[in-house]
Image (tube, helix red, strand yellow):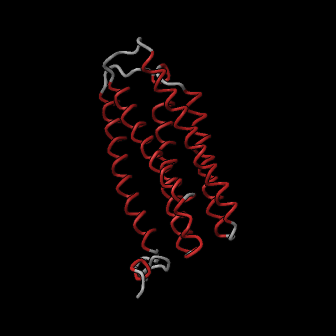
Amino acid sequence: MQHEEEMIPYKVESREDTGLYNAKFGIWLFLASEVMLFGSLFSSYILLRVGSLSWPVQSDYLNVPIGALNSIILLTSSMFIIKAWSGLKENNFKKFRKFMWLTIAFAILFLGFKGFEYAQHFMNHEYPKKSVFLALYFLMTGLHALHILGGVVVNLYYVGPGSRLWKTNPQWFINRVEVAGLYWHFIDIVWIFLFSTMYLL
């Protein structure tokens, strides 16, 4: 009797109607919903800023050098996850593990710097207690940080117990890592918009 997961169609092969295997089709649908989520937040931010009579100078509130450093860290992690996926394509599992661990490490480093920024905000009592900008900043960057944390958990699973699939169905495992990479690139793109909008404009 076939195992149930072996009977799932298009887990590896592409569908005829979309040209994508199921997981890749699913992640694109999920990312479309994420675009709507973050798009609504960015739209609210723009409307509130345009309609404000006294919007603060954002660079006075935020640590631009740390934000820039975090941008470099996150973009580098995006390169690492591509390297991890290419390692699997080359049948080099050792390369996959090396670059996936680097992806995870850089993500944790990003969250560490973000936590340092948050601590600076909470310790600085000169900041106004009621600030629409800071409320949006914490909401949007906090939501983004949760997305990174979720990605870290998934990547830890793939580099850990989930990697057993590599021995039984390597192509399926490659597809899973590719899907994780697409998600990772998306949260990188969101950060670029967050950094540009909140730190620089």
Residue 80 lies, in percent from the top left, at 64, 53
Q: Quadrant of residue 131?
A: top left
| Residue nearest the observer in this picture, 147 or 93 | 93
Q: Which residue is drawn at 35% across and 15% down?
A: 128
Position above or below: 106 against 21: above
Establish if 57 lies above or below 86.
above
Q: Farthest top residue?
A: 126
Q: Is residue 40 left or right of residue 106?
A: left
Q: Where is residue 147 in the image (x, y as percent from the top left)?
A: 43, 46
Q: In which quarter of the image is residue 1?
A: bottom left
Percent coordinates x, y for residue 86 in the rendering = 65, 64
Q: Residue at x 49, y 24 (%)?
A: 62
Q: Residue furthest bottom?
A: 1
**How many numbered marks have been drawn onto this rendered protein structure?**
0
Direction from residue 25 to residue 196 in the image, left or right: right
Residue 8 % position (x, y) = 40, 79
**Which of 139/166 is in front?**
166
Residue with the most extreme front position: 1
Q: Is residue 2 above or below residue 142?
A: below
Residue at 44% x, 81% y is 6
Residue closest to the eye, 85 or 15: 85
Residue 171 lies in what quarter of the image? bottom right
Side of 87 where 13 appears, left or right: left
